[in-house]
Amino acid sequence: MNVRTGNAGKKFGEFLSFSLPVTLAAICILLPLMIGFASAKLSSTSSLQGVILSGILFPAFILAILKPRILIPYTLLIWAIAPELRRIADWAEGVYHSVSLLSLAPLLTGATLVIPVLREIHKMKRSSNRIVLLFAAALAYGALIGLAKNGMGSVYDLANYIVPLLLIPFFAVTPFTTKDMDRLLHAYANIAVMVAVYGIIQYLTVPPWDAFWMRHADMISIGLPYPLEIRVFSTLNSPGPAAAFLVFALVPMILEKRWQGSLRWIGVLLVVVCLLTTLVRSAWLVLLVMLLVYIGSSSSKGKWKTLLQITFVACALIWIVPKLPGAEGLVARMETLTSVKEDHSYNERLGLWQNMLPMVAANPVGEGIGSVGTGTKLGNGGELGEYGIMDNGFIALLLTFGVAGAVFFFGALGAVVKQIVVRVIRKDSEQPYARLALAAWCGAIASLVSDNGFPGMKGYLIWMLIGLGLSAKEVIESRKKGTPHAAIERKIISN
């Protein structure tokens, strides 16, 4: 009986390995044709957006089938530049669109991760399955409540949670060597430097498409569309996401030379300067937490080396920042970190906690997915809903998932950090990736004091860094079971 079952499973696996590539190839051929046909039936605006969207998605499908490890840097690039492409398209047309098809580009690109995941899902281990099931339970509960209360907005918001979480099974089933992980972090650093360079240009000149968007988006918190009077958002859609993209790249760039990117320390300084111009102080909290966690979990020799590198960056900043154009505003903004109780933003967040906590306690069921954040635009005529801006991530999660859903969500986070800590305790050559994963997890929790970073781009960055640490764990276990490193390399090349 067991033999027959094994043979049946083997034949089914062979069938999948043959039919899946054929099916995916057919999708890659037919999907652009379908998008092109649909675009021809749409208005000129939607048609232009559809053409750009199909041009972005097609390489993602090819990479998902042939080179899934390269798909991650490509998706990072799309997360970084899609908002800028949207602004340029609106500016070229002369019409501002509060809702655009191009907003879906990063999500749809990230969704192609499901292709390599489904192809190798049978390789997932019990520990990864447990994490996925806990998150799935939380999301299923939040989606049911959200569909009932928030309509289609919950679908968009659900996708913002699911796409980043796809990285957990992706790293669990896709073999990454240390060289692959270094290449990924190197690519991320290069993209961050690109974002930083454009951000500095934006701060000094304010390109016309960015000024056009600022005038129509009605976001008074990002300054004025004039040089030196703007809070930099670079190629992202606001200063907060721009700061998050830079911070999660900056930490590995400071910590390890091999993760710095092509420009080395020049790139590090460019990212730091651009981060300053975003004026997002919570990003510096995340930076500090991540650095302290990484340093605290490293060896004594490694601690001194890292502290020396941080001292170098700090000294360079002390010398550079006062010489920057508009330095007075930057320095004044950073000085508020030393007088938090007198800060208006801090007092608003404190008031939000005091006002919203009783409301959350009185509604243990929750409002469901789609009740908080940008997803509220879809059911509100393109305008943010009641909880469209929520400057406290803990309240946002409790309001979204209620008590029951939050238990599953935070339980999944606990299961993740448990795996990471076990990996950090082991002393081996892949430990830096585990320490980086632990730093990212702690940074994500610390950032909840300002916003819920788990959906969307920030969530993608968090789960990418965590997934690298867990992927390093899989490489170690494979070696311990006798799988030669060269065999792993050959398997990766064949995939």
Image (spheres, rainbow, N blue to C red):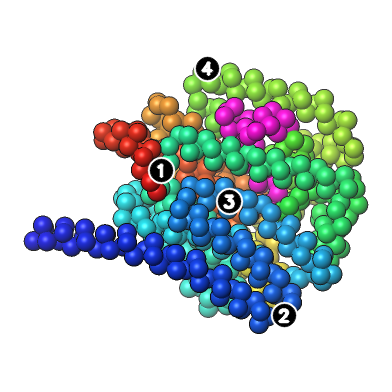
The residue under the point 66% across, 69% down is 51
Give the label, 4 or 1, closer to the camera: 1
**Magenta segment, prevailing SS (helix, strand or loop):** helix
Question: Seen in the image, is 302 located left or right of residue 482?
Answer: right
Image point (61%, 78%), residue name? 38
Q: Nearer the viewer, mark 3 or mark 4?
A: 3
Callout 2, which amino acid?
Ser
Task: Tell me the quarter of the picture where residue 93 sits.
Answer: bottom right
Q: Earlier in the sequence, mark 2 or mark 1?
A: 2
Span highlighted in magenta in the image: 241-269
Q: Is residue 36 above or below residue 60?
A: below
Q: Earlier in the sequence, mark 4 or mark 1?
A: 4
Label 4, on which residue? 301
Nearer-N-terminus badge (4/2): 2
Local SS, label 2: loop
Task: Name the spot of residue 410 as percent of width and height, x first.
Answer: 47, 53
Residue 493 tag number: 1
Residue 355, percent from left and from top? 67, 60
